[in-house]
Amino acid sequence: MKNNLKVLVTRVIAGAAFAGMLYACSDQLATDDSNLKDGSLRSADVSLLATPVGPSTATECTITTITANTTWSPSGNPYILYGDVRVASGVTLTIQAGTVIRGDKASRGTLTILRGARIIANGTSTSPIVFTSNQPAGSRASKDWGGVNILGSAPNNQGANVNAEGYPSCVTAPQYGGTNCADNSGVLRYVRIEYGGIPQATVPNSEKNGLTLYSVGSGTTIDHVQVSFGGDDAFEWFGGCVNAKYLISYRNQDDDFDTDFGYSGKVQFGIAVRDPAINDNSASNGFESDTDADGVNATRTTARFSNFTLVGPYDPACARTVVDNASPNPRFLDGLHLRRNTGIDVYNSIITGWRNAQVYAEPSSIVSAASGGVALSHNTAVKPANALVPASVCFIEPAAANNVWTISATNICADATACANGGVGSMVTNSGLGTAAWTLTNPSVRPSTATVAIQTNGTNANALDSFFTVNETTTGATTYYRGARRFVDDNGWDFGGSWVNYDPQNAPYPN
């Protein structure tokens, strides 16, 4: 695909050397993105202040490689990613707080941090780093660009040189994997990723996500990252040992948190809010966890998650349409969808409002935790009354203050009224959340009061692993809470800053 539109730009990136530019191209695009062939969409809003990264005539088959240490700063806003922009091994890309990076739609702009490279994206709560669509306000949509991919040298269960998915057949896919669990790919802190992630038309079952972490090591720092309106998963881990805290998945298309290929890291404090009008052909879950595609690899996925709140498509206040509440799109499935021999552990989490099961575990994952199977402890699952839930795969808590779920056919779910704004038996009351958790334009998963069960029925995450922050109901207390937030304060979320944005469609990013 050729595009002859001349982009009016006068600046280039100082100190960056670009090599390996491939000008081969492919006219095959996803059928739902045929409008990308319209050249008038390419860079129509780029002004004289734009800084292009890669040629403006790029296609998705164009690779631009940054081969020298480079810094992007707010004074260079916005940076436009054309095609596949790769940071070479041994090179560090530093992105200063407040910088905006925009992905070109026509060429499916993508940022790829290659194995051995580093990204230092160190934003602040009041000056976040933003990766977003290059479309103007009012025209932004999921699948506008390719998202952020980080490839590392930590172990996975597929090998030392695995081809990353999501890349078109017209380029050589980058590789990931190795033996260094402590590998350091840099820093992502106070970062927003909006409208990224896209299926690959030329390679079946291959997608880019909002943030994809391929064998990333525990030397990497990831905290305070929001992924919004993504075209596939919000966060996906392919192996690796990287840890993370304070993650938000907001109105994304496929899964919120997806773990594969023996991922063994730890993640604490996560929020997922689903829009009943946004889902994926492959079925949308809160968590989706596999060991591998066949579920036979002996090196299981063994990640540990604590203090998550997953808000599904059902709306307890009936603010959405009756159709949405009575039968959300069949493409929605489960809050926790655990399959293919996974062995992840989930603690102190709230799962509610999902169409099928709040927690579903395939038989291959149902073995004792001591044998590497799934461990579920001190969680609250609240099933809408009209959800489609077979009793044999359904779980309900709390049955007791320190209950650990036992997976068996005798677990019977108690129904919660889907369309009841509070009151006994409602999703609001049973989950301990306020109705604001289902307010799409400004969701909040803060508990409704300080006395609900989720504020007293958790377990101490720090006692499970020193990486986890002690999730006390108040500082210095001896009781522990469930879910992503506690009642007394935001406990490190820094919502008082501007790093979270629930209206990226109308954000006035510079052109």
Image (tube, helix red, strand yellow):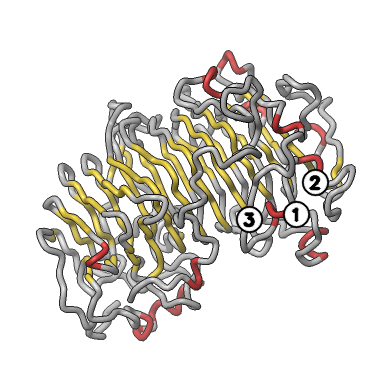
Between 233 and 298, the one nearer to me in the picture: 233
Residues at marks 2 and 3 touching, judged by CB atoms closer than 8 Å: no
Q: Quadrant of the C terminus?
A: bottom left
Element type where label 1 sits in the image: loop
Element type where label 3 sits in the image: loop
Q: Give the residue number, with chain letter if any, for mark 3.
A: 443
Decide: is 15 above or below 47: above
What residue is rendered at 63% in x and 16% in y? 368
Q: Give the residue number, with chain letter if any, for mark 1.
A: 314
What residue is rendered at 27% in x and 35% in y? 184
Residues at marks 2 and 1 touching, judged by CB atoms closer than 8 Å: yes
Decide: is 208 above or below 132: above
- Looking at the rendered structure, the kind of residue marked 3 is Pro
Q: Give the residue number, with chain letter if any, for mark 2.
A: 427
Report, in whole angstroms, how far the alpha carbon at label 2 lies from the one at label 3: 16 Å
Instruction: Report the disc number at residue 119.
Output: none
Q: Residues within 10 Å of mark 3 (few under 14, many from 20)?
A: some
Sequence-wise, the earlier of marks 3 and 1 is: 1
